[in-house]
Image (cartoon, rainbow, N blue to C red):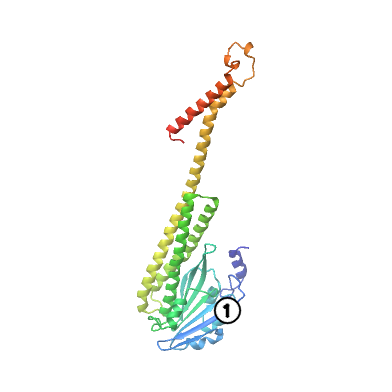
Amino acid sequence: MDDRSDIFYKKKGLPPGTPVFVGKTREEEVKITVLDYDRERLETLAPAEADGCRAYLDRPTTTWINVDGLHQAEVIEKLGNCIGLHPLTTEDILHTRQRPKIDIYDDYVYLVVRMPEYFSATHKIGLEQVSFVLGKNYLVTFQEKEGDTFDAVRNRIKNNQGRIRKMGPDYLAYALLDSIVDNYFGLLEQVGEQIEVLEEELVDNPTPATLHKIHSLKREMILLRKSIWPLRELVNSLQREEIPFISESITFFLKDLYDHTIQVLETVETYRDIISGMLDMYLSSVSNRMNEIMKVLTIYAAIFIPLTFIAGVYGMNFNPAASPFNMPELNWYFGYPAALLLMAAVATALLIFFRKKEWL
């Protein structure tokens, strides 16, 4: 059973809003971390309880609640009820096959993005779903597993660097989105290096394994494009539409973020074109190699055809005395070496001819 059929199987017959986890099953516990801060103070709580987060949401400070792990649906449902999430939002959080989107509710804004990860050992790209719930003075992020690209943002909060402690949760959401988009740039650098290696391999010695690598990389680019294209539309909606809980001062930062998503998308499109060209290059290279092989075989055949003809003429079985045609060389003492010399002369003449034609 593939992933899509497994999704339909899990949700078959259930009413909308039913909290069912769809994704990779994990053994570790769901981890909830709370960062509550303003300009003067910072409070960290890890691990936190799902039903104890409401007290932070009522404070006038900025609260960031991060959830690592979605495989325990009851924990996510309890936290969603504590925050006041709509059942459809909770369902979307647990459904890890969502495409990037934005949903606007009365009390919060719900965002879904895909966070990339590059596995250098296998040269594969992984995409993890990250959900954002942005409220008046809080931001809740839901991740599939522990480990992300937000450490730089956490350090800025803990060390009170930049403007992040002076701004609200909307700026925090922007900072996290910017961190995800920046991670795409790092991933594309790795892909670019892989493309350079494949190009050298195509020129030196293309093999069926090379073709497999090209097809694999092409699938990875399609996967990236499917996550970047809707992310661009999401960021565009954030900066252009009047969305609650996003102040006008954040619009300028969102414009810069939108420009970054455009750069990522253009890079992905460029790499797709390069990879498609590499596929054509591979087919042309294989075809050229086959043509070279066929040319060499044809030249050898062209050389041996007259030699075979000469050998066939003097290898016919008949009685020379009974023939009306006289072939004195059959009874000649030097007939055999003369035939060999004739063959060598014909072969040499053909080789000289092919060399002058630059076929060899």
Q: Residue at x 48, y 55 (%)?
A: 198
Percent from the top left, x then y, of residue 172? Answer: 43, 79
Q: Name the one closer to the observer, 267 or 239.
A: 267
Q: Residue at x 49, y 53 (%)?
A: 201
Q: Name the one closer to the observer, 179 or 172.
A: 179
Residue 225 vertical placement versus 242 (above, below): above
Q: Residue at x 59, y 77 (%)?
A: 73
Q: Residue at x 52, y 53 (%)?
A: 210
Q: Name the one closer to the observer, 241 or 139.
A: 139
Say which residue label 1 marks: 30
Q: Name the one closer to the observer, 188 or 207.
A: 207
For the image, the number of numbered tags is: 1
Query: How crowded is the residue under tag 1: few (<14 C-alpha within 10 Å), some, or many (20+)?
Result: many
Judged from this view, the residue extending furthest toward the front is 333
SS at mark 1 in the image: loop
Percent from the top left, x then y, of residue 169? Answer: 43, 81
- The reply to whether residue 301 is visible in this rendering is yes
- Going by the numbered disc 1, the residue's amino acid type is Val
- Residue 9 appears in which quarter of the rendering? bottom right
Which quadrant of the rendered structure holds the N terminus? Answer: bottom right
- Residue 333 appears in which quarter of the rendering? top right
Percent from the top left, x then y, of residue 108? Answer: 46, 80
Residue 303 vertical placement versus 162 (above, below): above
